[in-house]
Amino acid sequence: MSPTLRQTNAAALTVAAAVIGYVLFSQYVQGYQPCELCWRERWPWYAVLGFGIAGLIVPSRLWLMLIAVALLVSTGLGLHHVGVEQHWWAGPSACASNGSGTASVAELKAMMMRETQVIQCDQPIWFFLGLSMATWNFIASLVAAVAAITLVIRSRHAHS
């Protein structure tokens, strides 16, 4: 027996809430400040939260398809961040360890006066089982995206 659309949306909502809950916990309780790429990686999960809530209110394959797309975007963003960490490609100049992310001495001075610390996208500071948080986000996003796509396909066949 396959899960209903409401159950599937509830599962996606639960996973997204767990991911966002953990990154907020790691930021505000554990003190791990996110880099620019980390901030970007949160947005698809926020979208999954919204689509999951909408899918609970009005169950529809549309919400499940949007969840799958958001998770594919999250997978791509996670892979991009992993590539930056592994130095496979360059990340945003504002968070690379090869510079301050400023274009001039005046910008650097202004940044120092604001006491803003640039968080390096290519220098992971959090590891679990030898993998960075960006790598775990990539893995979680990929697994969730495959599950969502599978459920979209199954729900299509169930309604054919």
Image (spheres, rainbow, N blue to C red):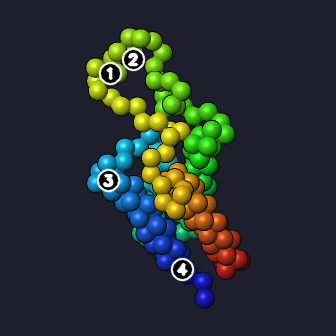
Viewer-side residue, 123 vs 7: 123
Kindly identify which residue carries mark 2: 108
Q: Residues within 10 Å of mark 3 (few under 14, many from 20)?
A: few
How far, Cα to Cα, is label 3 from label 1? 24 Å
Q: Which mark is residue 4?
A: 4
Kindly identify which residue carries mark 1: 112
Which one is in front in this view, the residue at disc 3 or the one at disc 4? 3
Q: Mark 2 and mark 3 in contact (Cβ < 8 Å)? A: no
- Above or below residue 121? Residue 56 is below
Q: Disc 3 or 2, which lies upstream in sequence?
A: 3
Kindly identify which residue carries mark 3: 30
Secondary structure under the numbered disc 2 in the rendered image:
helix
Secondary structure under the numbered disc 1 in the rendered image:
helix
User: Which quadrant of the view contains residue 112?
Assistant: top left
Q: Mark 1 and mark 4 in contact (Cβ < 8 Å)? A: no
How far, Cα to Cα, is label 4 from label 2? 54 Å
The kind of residue on which mark 4 rests is: Thr
Q: Mark 1 and mark 3 in contact (Cβ < 8 Å)? A: no
Q: Which residue: 66% across, 71% down?
A: 150
The kind of residue on which mark 2 rests is: Leu
User: Is residue 29 visible from the viewing direction of this image?
Assistant: yes
Q: Disc 4 or 1, which lies upstream in sequence?
A: 4
Q: Which residue: 44% across, 47% down?
A: 125
Viewer-side residue, 17 vs 28: 28
User: Which quadrant of the view contains residue 139?
Assistant: bottom right
Residue 118 image point, x, y percent: 40, 31
Q: Disc 3 or 4, which lies upstream in sequence?
A: 4
Viewer-side residue, 147 vs 19: 19
